[in-house]
Amino acid sequence: MAQNKSINSNMPHIVRTNVFVQNILLLIFLLFSLCLLSGCNGYKFLSIEQIEPGTLAQRIGSRTEKVTDLCLSGTLDSSDVVYIENLTNGSDLLTSLDLSNTKVSLYDHTFAGCMYLKMVKLPQSSTAVNDYMFSDCKKLQTVILPSECTFIGQETFSDCIRLEEIHFPISLSYIGINAFKNCTGLEKIISAAPTPPHCEPSSFNGISPQCMLIVPKGATSKYHNAVGWEHFINIIEDKNADKNKSTQWGKN
């Protein structure tokens, strides 16, 4: 009888403890669910469509604070470009930027020195990648060039030490001075042009001669004898090299 009284006297304490533990578990569950929902409601990936010139900052608002991937479409003006430049240089979260469906003129140095940007799709409406646009972007791994790109400027990708692969569209006709200087991580270049784009002697300074250069079938001798290309010793012909792959993320 005394033992039963002892057990009964401890019951309220046990009940209170169980309720407390249940409340803690419920709180943990709610916090976890909130984190999942925040990731699904645009805090990781943010897409802004049908942008009118000069409205980008207003359309995005404060949502960039937790965005890692930003996709834009519409028409952008110079004030929008300045906003993008400040955004990519000021956020340590934003690592991926898709401008492929925008109409915008990007100027020299737009992304230069951005320490966190890893992947960029450039506007398909553009025909040039201007001077120093990505110079010293230490974490940049992937850049998708416009499919009608004709011009890569001076030191456009200089010191992009983590750039691994790049696809040159068939339209490319010029690669500027030191355009890929010290891109020491570059492992593969795919050039779709049967005739080598005109290069400066220093266009690929600092690139490993072992970097794989893939060219259209029958174009090896042209590249081997062309200024700026003659340093590549690992030239491989691929009958599909002239197929446009410039709109896809990552390696193919």
Image (cartoon, rainbow, N blue to C red):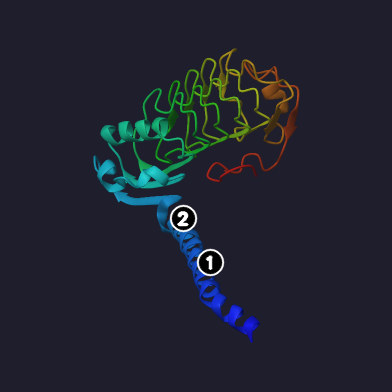
Screen quadrant of the N terminus: bottom right
**Residue 205, horizontal then vertical, whole percent:** 62, 15
* Name of the residue lying farthest toward the top: 201
Q: Residue at x 37, y 35 (%)?
A: 87
**Residue 128, horizontal then vertical, whole percent:** 43, 29
Q: Which mark is residue 2?
A: none
Pointer 2 residue: 39
Amino acid at the residue labelled 2: Gly
Q: Is residue 239 left or right of residue 45?
A: right
Disc 1 secondary structure class:
helix
Disc 2 secondary structure class:
helix
**Residue 13, horizontal then vertical, whole percent:** 52, 72
Q: Is residue 252 left or right of residue 38?
A: right
* Name of the residue lying farthest toward the bottom: 1
Residue 61 seen by the camera: yes
Q: Residue at x 63, y 83 (%)?
A: 2
